[in-house]
Amino acid sequence: MPSVYNWQLGREMTYRFDHAAPQWQFAAVFNINRCLACQTCTMACKSTWTFSEGQEYMWWNNVETKPYGGYPQHWDVKTLELIEQAKPGGQTWGGNPASDAPYGTYGGSTIFEAASLGNVAVGYLPTDEEWTSPNIHEDSPVATTALSEGVSLPEHQTWFFYLQRICNHCTYPACLAACPRNAIYKREEDGIVLIDQDRCRGYRKCVEQCPYKKPMYRADTRTSEKCIGCYPRVEGSDPLTEGLPMETRCMASCPGQIRLQGLVRVDEDGTWAEDPDNPLYYLVREEQLALPLYPQFGTAPNVYYIPPRWVPRPYLRQMFGPGVDDAIAAYERPSRRAQAVLQLFRVSQSIIFSFEVIDGPKIAEINVGGRPLEIFDDTVVGYGRDGEEIVRVNVREPQYERPIQYLNTI
Ligand code: SF4
Ligand code: SF4
Ligand code: SF4
Ligand code: F3S
């Protein structure tokens, strides 16, 4: 089996195919700290792509309450158990973080390395019952007073958080590797992973071996379907942006402004090509504010999360890897440049390919963790694919005062 480099694991791993770098890679950053669980993203996807008969339980975008919720139920715990069985106690990280291995080196088995003969990955098929309740355990908290590490603010003893999930359009997709019909492909132009509906025969190996359980079987067509990365929008086919690449439905509709989506360049070895002016590259690789979901699965997912500040660290470390503490520290005391880039979330429907920060005056000095943090009213400018300016916003958000005659009216 070929060996590929997975920068999230800091090492080579086995995969069914050699690495083939797409021209651009679809990627996104989700800021968990800001999510309202309003499910606008969920309904935006549902009403655009999966409204037909036979697609009733397809929620390509879902927002689940952790730790108890999940769609399908228990998807993460069950897959974690499978890789744990392959190498008990192995889900540990060692080595020293380096520029090409920012989280160190993963010592356990990936879903590919844990596979038995004849399978490309470990996995399981969820039961019908596990697919029936997309928002089960919404807002159910857990108390973790018995944690050995103890809990201190900003962590909470009673907690839950919302986890927003779409297909990760993985660099090494397990669904693609698992399909005996070769019906799944990764697009050369943007790295979006699609299921060819004409080739699919409903074998469901993709459903079984995607660790994130994002391909979903449709009984009436006997094929599987999944998030299509809103590829017509990403291609720029929507007239609204006049040919410019456009953010997806679930990203563009988010009232919590938690999502930033775009395209990044990928090197031949699978790492992200250096591009510090790309806002996604900047947040993920330069500042390391956002982390992959269950990197130990080994598919190199391309959706990244700014972890929730209030959740006990052991839970977050098993979910996002060893970069959690640094990511939360960087989010609590964002650098001057990061403060500006965080303003770019949800300010434009067009994809922002690069940004520039123009210095402004100092407007405040606040105390964070006993140390001063300066705030500047810098301006951040977002540029599109061809270098054209598409948005300009300030760190200081505008305030609007409702005229007295309109108080308490709509
Ligand atoms: Fe969260 Fe945004 Fe989705 Fe609402 S639309 S649930 S804020 S990700
Ligand atoms: Fe395939 Fe699952 Fe990765 Fe999506 S998240 S590309 S369905 S392995
Ligand atoms: Fe749905 Fe598009 Fe979001 Fe995928 S990217 S979950 S297809 S809205
Ligand atoms: Fe292949 Fe999945 Fe269809 S395994 S045949 S794409 S159901």
Image (spheres, rainbow, N blue to C red):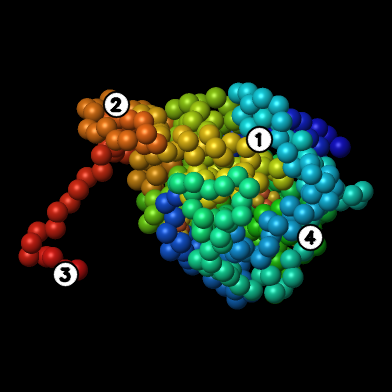
The residue that mark 2 highlights is 358
State the residue at coordinates (60%, 45%).
149
- At label 3, counting other C-alpha atoms closer than 10 Å, the crowd grade (few under 14, some 14-19, many 20 or more) is few
The residue that mark 3 highlights is 409
On-image quarter of the C terminus: bottom left
User: Which residue is outermost to the right?
Assistant: 117
**Tags 1 and 4 in contact by the CB under 8 Å rule?**
no
Residue 185, given in percent of the width and then of the height, sits at 70, 47
Q: Secondary structure at mark 4?
A: loop
Residue 359 vertical placement versus 59 (above, below): above
- Disc 4 marks a residue whose amino acid type is Tyr
Q: Which badge, 2 or 4, comes first in the chain's sequence?
A: 4
- Disc 1 marks a residue whose amino acid type is Gln
Q: In 3D space, how far apart are the residues under numbered discs 3 and 4 (Cα atoms)? A: 53 Å
The residue that mark 4 highlights is 124
Question: As drawn, is 191 to the left or to the right of 155?
Answer: right
State the residue at coordinates (45%, 46%).
154
Q: Which badge, 2 or 1, comes first in the chain's sequence?
A: 1
- Nearest the viewer among 175 and 11 is 11
- Which label was assigned to residue 8? 1
Q: Quadrant of residue 201?
A: bottom right
Residue 253, given in percent of the width and then of the height, sits at 41, 57
Residue 327, given in percent of the width and then of the height, sits at 51, 37
